[in-house]
Amino acid sequence: MEGILKKVKFDDKGLVPAIVQDVESGEVLMVAYMNRLALEKTLETGYTHFWSRSRNRLWKKGEESGHVQKVDEIRLDCDSDTILVRVYQEGAACHMGHRSCFFRKLDRGGWRVDGDKVFIPQDVYGEGCTILEHIYEVILDRKHHIDRQDSYVASLFRKGLDAILKKVGEEATEVVLACKDGDKDRVAYEVADLFFHTLVAMGYHNVPPADIYRELGRRFGKSGLKADEG
């Protein structure tokens, strides 16, 4: 294996970019980084491993979501400084639930979501989660086009975090009042408002719904009472 690794030109931080491609469709799924350890683990296990620059640690693709990548072949480019990994992708490659991380397309001067299929574990979360993904994408679009005068969300981003959090607090209070009144229709209406403004707050911090799904999945089936007793 040492001879294989010597051929790869890692940068001054010990990293090499890895382009991940679907072996069946040819679609580019994602771009990540590998260090020597990540490449070794990929070669040893047959599943992609990468080095997280933000978390400064090794990670296996799909270790939390189950959306693993089984390696078919690995190629090295002409300059030996970029790796192409052809894989069989299980579910979504993108952490936001899309098949590919490259789901935004430049269209008429702006970035638009190209395709609407997201991969959410249906046995746990149900089909309704996809609407949260779509709303979140629109929120991010407004965040990136903050000067839009016809957008309520863009106006919130212009006002800043305090204005967004104020709306979350107001909507939470409305949910409490609706529940106290026992009006089911109003409860649904106010909870929808709360969800929406919470998504705006998540968009401010770049926290996608998929992160919430994973956290709920981590807790799913666990007893909170037993945890508290510990």
Image (cartoon, rainbow, N blue to C red):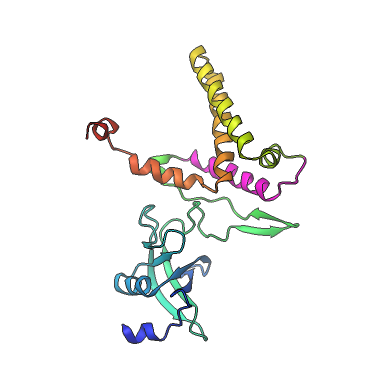
Of all residues, the one furthest to the right in this rendering is: 149
Quick check: 100 above or below 204?
below
- Name the foreground residue: 213 vs 159: 159
Quick check: 62 above or below 195?
below
- Asked whether 129 falls inside the magenta stretch, the response is yes
Give the prevailing secondary structure in the magenta stretch: helix
| Image position of 230 (left or right of 3) | left
Q: Residue at x 53, y 16 (%)?
A: 177
Q: Residue at x 28, y 37 (%)?
A: 222
- Name the foreground residue: 91 vs 33: 33
Q: Residue at x 47, y 75 (%)?
A: 84
Question: What span is in magenta?
Answer: 127-149
Look at the image and tell me in which quarter the N terminus lies: bottom left
Q: How many marks?
A: 0
The answer to which image quadrant residue 103 occupies is bottom right
Q: Residue at x 53, y 67 (%)?
A: 28
Look at the image and tell me in which quarter the C terminus lies: top left
Quick check: 207 above or below 192?
below
Of all residues, the one furthest to the left in this rendering is: 230
- Asked whether 90 falls inside the magenta stretch, the response is no
Position of residue 201 measured from the top left corner of the image (x, y, whole percent) = 57, 39
| Image position of 211 (left or right of 199) | left
- Name the foreground residue: 121 vs 40: 40
Position of residue 202 measured from the top left corner of the image (x, y, whole percent) = 54, 42
| Image position of 114 (left or right of 25) | right
Position of residue 52 measured from the top left corner of the image (x, y, whole percent) = 43, 63
Position of residue 80 measured from the top left corner of the image (x, y, whole percent) = 48, 84
